[in-house]
């Protein structure tokens, strides 16, 4: 039975408002026996707060139903470096907490850093940025949460982790070593793994071609694009990323998915 990997903003809700019908759509899909996880590139919130927001909007969820970039980054670094290695962190409390929970030691001293972990940091300053640069220059493994240039917020958008990555790459004259969030396969495998399924047994449902649909195309998931977020039907037809299904919203997707 196929599982679902579902994006949040633009797919289940927009900002603080539920997209009408997405609560009952997910309820029907779950009631039919399909497992669902939610995959988010947002590094400045904890799995618990994503879950609480979903639950308050009528989509019951616990932290284990969320696959966040912080969790995926922490697991990736643990696998790559082994426990006890020192990580210099650019990011907010949820990223720090996830790294600590995974058994990694954080340091603010670039001379000691085996790795740099970078997430969206709304308190980023020159000293922190320079520490990341010096650590990377010394050979630390640089891993970032998500490539999004901006994050949509009420009334506009804010620079996100992708803008920070670009600044660091400019200073270094090279790319960071990995960005684990959507569209990376790292995120797809973490989400499918959480469902206990192979990527080919999963559907990705999301509103962005360059992250949600690209990840699905590259990692082997089936892909459904919903037009309830940041993409128009005309953009969906342009490619190069190809959804297997285009729906107005999650409710329309559920109608189709459950009648196949
Ligand atoms: Mg989205």
Image (cartoon, rainbow, N blue to C red):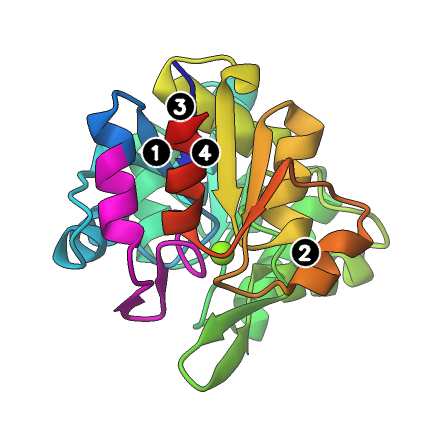
Q: Tell me, yes or no, if residue 114 can be seen here.
A: no
**Mark closer to the chain start, 2 or 4:** 4
Q: How many other residues sit within 10 Å of disc 1, few (<14), some (14-19) or many (≥20)?
A: many
As drawn, 193 above or below 217? above
Q: How many other residues sit within 10 Å of disc 2, few (<14), some (14-19) or many (≥20)?
A: many
Which residue ends up furthest to the bottom in the rendered image?
Answer: 155
Give the residues in magenta. Answer: 7-28
Q: Is residue 132 left or right of residue 170?
A: left
Mark nearest the camera among 1 and 2 is: 1
Q: Which residue is mark 3?
A: 3
Q: Which residue is mark 1?
A: 37
The answer to whether the residue labelled 3 contacts the one labelled 4, judged by CB atoms less than 8 Å apart, is no
Q: Is residue 172 left or right of residue 212?
A: right
Element type at mark 2: helix
In the image, which disc is placed on residue 72? 4
Mark nearest the camera among 2 and 4 is: 4
Q: Which residue is mark 2?
A: 133
Image location of residue 76, percent across then percent down: 51, 27
The answer to whether the residue labelled 2 contacts the one labelled 4, judged by CB atoms less than 8 Å apart, is no
Mark nearest the camera among 1 and 3 is: 3
Image location of residue 43, percent across then percent down: 42, 53
Mark nearest the camera among 3 and 2 is: 3
Which residue ends up furthest to the right in the rendered image?
Answer: 173
The residue shown at (49%, 72%) is: 152
Image location of residue 108, percent across then percent down: 45, 52
């Amino acid at each position: 039975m196929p599982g679902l990997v579902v994006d949040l903003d633009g797919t289940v809700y927009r900002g603080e408002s539920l997209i009408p019908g997405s609560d009952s759509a997910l309820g029907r899909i779950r009631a039919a026996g399909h497992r669902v996880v939610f995959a988010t590139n947002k590094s400045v919130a904890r799995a618990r707060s994503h879950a609480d927001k979903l639950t308050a909007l009528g989509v019951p969820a616990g932290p284990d139903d969320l696959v966040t970039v912080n969790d995926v980054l922490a697991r990736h670094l643990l696998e790559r470096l082994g426990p006890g290695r020192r990580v210099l962190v650019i990011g907010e409390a949820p990223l720090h907490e996830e790294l600590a929970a995974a058994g990694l030691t954080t340091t603010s001293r670039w001379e000691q850093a085996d790795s740099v972990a970078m997430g969206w940091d709304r308190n980023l300053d020159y000293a922190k940025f320079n520490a990341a640069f010096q650590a990377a220059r010394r050979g630390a493994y640089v891993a970032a949460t998500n490539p999004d240039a901006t994050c949509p917020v009420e009334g506009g958008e804010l620079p996100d982790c992708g803008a920070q990555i670009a600044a660091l790459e400019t200073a270094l004259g090279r790319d960071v070593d990995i960005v684990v969030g959507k569209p990376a396969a790292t995120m797809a495998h973490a989400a499918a793994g959480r469902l206990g399924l192979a990527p080919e047994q999963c559907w990705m449902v999301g509103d962005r071609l360059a992250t949600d649909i690209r990840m699905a195309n590259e990692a082997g998931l089936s892909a459904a694009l919903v037009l309830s977020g940041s993409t128009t039907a005309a953009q969906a037809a342009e490619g190069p990323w190809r959804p297997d299904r285009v729906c107005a919203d999650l409710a329309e997707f559920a109608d189709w998915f459950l009648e196949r």
